[in-house]
Image (cartoon, helix red, strand yellow):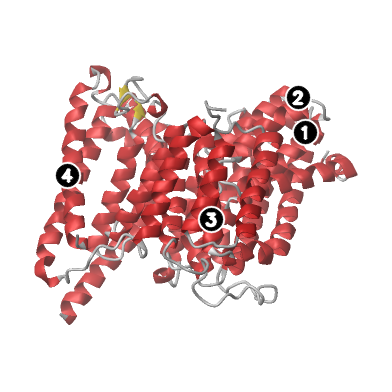
Amino acid sequence: MTRRQAELLLLCGFLILAVLLYRSTAAYPPTVQNSTARYVRFLGLALGFFSLLELGLWFRKGAAVKAEKLAVAAVPGRFWGLFILLVVYSASLTRAGFYLASAVFLPLAMLLLGARKPLTIVLTTGGVLLFIYLVFARLLAVPLPAGTLF
Amino acid sequence: MILQALHELLTPVSLLAIFIGTTSGIIVGGMPGLTATMAVALLIPVTFALQPLTGLLLMGGVYCGAMYGGSIPAILLRTPGTPAAVATALEGYPLTQQGRGGLALKVSVVASFAGGMFSAFILLLTAPLLATFALKFGPPEYFLLALLGLAGIVSMAEDESRLVKALISGLLGLVMAVVGTDPISGMLRYTMGITDLYDGIAFMPALIGMFSISQMLELTGEAGGIVTGEPQLDRLKREPLPPGIGKPIALGSIVGTIIGILPGEGATIAAFVSYNIARRRSKKPELFGKGNPEGIAAAEAGNNGCVGGSLVPTLTLGIPGNSVAAALLGGLLIHGLIPGPELFTRYGVTTYAFILSLFIANVIFLLLGLFMAPYFARISLTPTALLIPVVCLFSVLGSYAMNNSIVDIFIALICGLAAIVLQKTGFSLGALILGLILGPIAETGFAQALIMGHGSYAIFFNRPQAVILWLIILLLLVPPLVQIYQRRRRRSDTA
């Protein structure tokens, strides 16, 4: 997908969002029709207006703009790999708990990103988790995600 | 009374309490997810066992230290430790990428020190007088104050297309901010039945996602470290402060103190407004966003200026200037110190000792910051293969810790991915965040003002404070719009 196509898609999405936002205020209670509903309607109108304006500018630029590919990531394998790892890690927190999930996530992410020395990986993982245990859990008593499995 | 307060303050126990408080504050502020409010609140039970003054000194130290500490990861890792450090990240991180992270830290600590000292001085001299001024601000003025902050969006743009995209980004932020409970009716809006969204989209996870996670994902393409230029950490100790940062520091200190005095207004707005004004008045506005030390100076002086400012209404009226001041107020009340005139007469020694301790806390973090800057800056040289997973882990933890919510982690991840797409297509993340942060203040102020004015918009124009705010907004809006128009004309002339 080119950058211009992505822009067009986004702007169309914002236009739809603006319409939905404006229409949603009809369901607001009568007591707030002249206060918060008016504010949200204004947001919908303004978003719609500026999205249309930008669409106008988009069409005006037309073919004058070079078709530039939208490259979200320089190294897609690492980028999406890390993102998927983050999603899986976050989802596993409620099952495996913070420490176990992190003890798996950190080494896997390091390996994915090119770390190859086992000692460095183990020491970094252990050091970070120990630090979190001492500062977050023991000293400040910040609740960490607890698992249901353990 | 002040001499007596000084005598109480200059004891080993008091000085140790300030030192421990300030150092802990820097650590807490430097970690995403741990806030100064949380640290002060956690300290309250600890202070039970201590003398009231010692407890207060600890809490004051944490407040000062945390406000500065937030800038360290913002500059080095583009991960704001506190929301107030977002504006600092906009300028600090590009400097880190150029290998000048140490200099950015140096500017940050000096500006934080100046802002903190100025606001503590104002607190010491004029607290009761300024508190009555702050009470004159009502909902219309709060709405206008939010508009004042949003005016910064216009100056983030370079041409008309960028301007429209920046405005769309700001509006998206404002739209995200309406998710949750309607502030007037209590009705739930756009929550999709998810209970974690009843209080709205928490801005810390969104911030972490947009600034930290997005940056870490982008860094996956870099083989070395964050620094793309030649690292210049070794010359940091002898490198002087960049010329021309005195003005933004002075400006940020004044703006931060004034905004801090207004009840409910926070250091984030102070930092953004100061940053925006500094950008408008700078001789090199084109360098903003690319690593301009003036931006760091204004933002840091602004958010630290809030510390003393927020304590003005807290100590004199019992109205906390922001959430940290609210936690501190809890600490005062627990020790039997009721805010009001008696705090400056009957309990004057304790109160003045507390105010004077803020000066010492500022000196402590200045010394620690200057001494430690070269060491902190070395973080940016860590190989990305180790740094990215660790920062991602802290980002996940930081997103979770605010509300103990897994949903917040996913909000951070979605925001991270969305931020990359938006940035690549020319939309402004700074404007989006500004909208998200200022949205609740703008909506509540707008709605309450309309109720007060029986639906008439005249209420936004017929009060003297409101008129002054409109004038300031216009002063901030006109120059960038004129510049954009002039650039457009120049372009069409040359075409």
Q: Earlier in the sequence, mark 2 or mark 3?
A: 3
Name the residue at 38% across, 42% down. Answer: B436
Q: Amino acid at mark 2?
A: His
Left or right of residue B276, residue B165 in this image: left
Q: Is residue A53 above or below residue B198?
A: below
Name the residue at 58% across, 50% down. Answer: B70
| Spatial separation of the CA atoms under disc 2 and disc 4 | 55 Å
| Spatial separation of the CA atoms under disc 2 and disc 3 | 35 Å
Q: Quadrant of residue B245?
A: bottom right
Q: Are marks 4 and 1 on the same chain?
A: no
Q: Which residue is tagged 2?
A: B335
Q: Nearer the viewer, residue B70 or B327?
A: B70
Q: Quadrant of residue B242?
A: bottom right
Q: Are marks 2 and 4 on the same chain?
A: no
Residue B150, visible in the rendered structure: no
On the image, the x and y values in percent for residue A77 come to 36, 59
- Secondary structure of the residue carrying tag 4 is helix
Judge depth for marks 2 and 3 and give the one in front. 3
- Secondary structure of the residue carrying tag 1 is helix
Q: Which mark is residue A15?
A: 4
The subunit letter for the residue under badge 2 reads B
**Badge 1: how crowded within 10 Å, few (<14), some, or many (20+)?**
many
Quadrant occupied by the C terminus of chain B? bottom left
Name the residue at 40% across, 39% down. Answer: B410
